[in-house]
Image: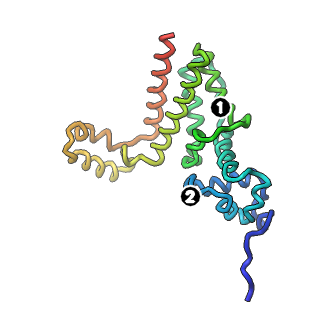
């Protein structure tokens, strides 16, 4: 009887990607895409790569290292737009660039809020937002909380877009009709009145509205200075 072999130590199976940081990040993203952030572990990522979990420590410092690397990948993959000097142009452009990057792996997006990153490519988008705010006339003590509010708003909007669509509305015709009927029959007058709009969820329009709404608040704050 042939004994079952365990994971190979240090080197992935023949034909698999070479074991390096990029391959490890890609494997971590596979785990997150399938089962969420809580499913990430050295063992789970090693299983995707077909290697012994100990071999990963040559490239990342444990689970925290995996999560930091994923957050850096999300931010580092952003295509930052060239600033125009117009805050109402530049901040939405950065917001859309972040959305484009985050939607490649939406279940990993919350890591941008929860990891304290240090690499140049991870911090470049943060610097870009601060640059826009400072150029618009915000002092540093205002620019930082505005930055944090913008990031939290973007992440929240993306999470709603990906995970909570049915709560706010549907995208397919049968789902819209069913949701509208439920709302109209809820016995709550304002909910029934808004049933048509509540039942429909346009991701692109919602994201654009949220950015515009947020920019209104930023500009109103700037006008008081």
Is 134 displayed left or right of 152 in the figure?
Answer: right
Is 220 displayed left or right of 71 in the figure?
Answer: left
Q: Position of residue 9 (x, y in %)?
A: 79, 66
Q: Position of residue 87 (x, y in %)?
A: 56, 20
> In the rendered image, which quarter contains the N terminus?
bottom right
70 or 57: nearer the viewer: 57
**Residue 72 tag number:** none
The crowding category of the residue bearing disc 2, from other C-alpha atoms within 10 Å (few below 14, some 14 to 19, many at least 20), is few
- The total number of labels drawn is 2
For the rendered model, the colour scheme is rainbow
Residue 103 lies, with reference to residue 38, above or below; the image says above
Q: CA distance from mark 2 to mark 1?
A: 27 Å
Residue found farthest to the bottom: 1
The crowding category of the residue bearing disc 1, from other C-alpha atoms within 10 Å (few below 14, some 14 to 19, many at least 20), is many
- Say what secondary structure mark 2 lies in: helix
Which residue is denoted by mark 1 in the rendering? 125
**Residue 34 tag number:** 2
Pointer 2 with pointer 1, Cβ within 8 A: no
Q: Position of residue 208 (x, y in %)?
A: 47, 32
Q: Position of residue 184 (x, y in %)?
A: 22, 45
Residue found farthest to the top: 225
């Amino acid at each position: 009887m042939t004994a079952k072999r365990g994971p190979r130590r240090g080197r992935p199976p023949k034909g698999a990607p070479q074991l390096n940081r990029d391959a490890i990040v890609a494997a971590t993203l596979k785990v997150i895409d399938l089962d969420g952030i809580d499913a990430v572990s050295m063992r789970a990522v090693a299983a995707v790569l077909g290697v012994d979990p100990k071999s990963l420590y040559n490239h990342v410092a444990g689970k925290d290292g995996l999560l930091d690397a994923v957050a850096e990948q999300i931010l580092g993959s952003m295509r930052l737009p060239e600033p125009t000097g117009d805050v109402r142009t530049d901040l939405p452009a950065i917001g859309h660039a972040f959305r484009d990057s985050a939607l490649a792996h939406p279940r990993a997006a919350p890591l941008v809020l929860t990891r304290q990153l240090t690499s140049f490519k991870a911090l470049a988008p943060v610097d870009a937002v601060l640059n826009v705010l400072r150029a618009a006339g915000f002092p540093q003590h205002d620019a930082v909380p505005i930055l944090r509010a913008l990031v939290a708003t973007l992440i929240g909007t993306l999470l709603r877009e990906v995970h909570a669509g049915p709560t706010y509305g549907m995208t397919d015709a049968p789902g819209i009709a069913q949701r509208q009927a439920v709302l109209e029959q809820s016995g709550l007058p304002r909910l029934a009145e808004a049933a048509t709009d509540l039942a429909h969820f346009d991701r692109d329009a919602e994201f654009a509205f949220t950015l515009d709404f947020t920019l209104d608040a930023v500009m109103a704050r700037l006008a008081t200075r």
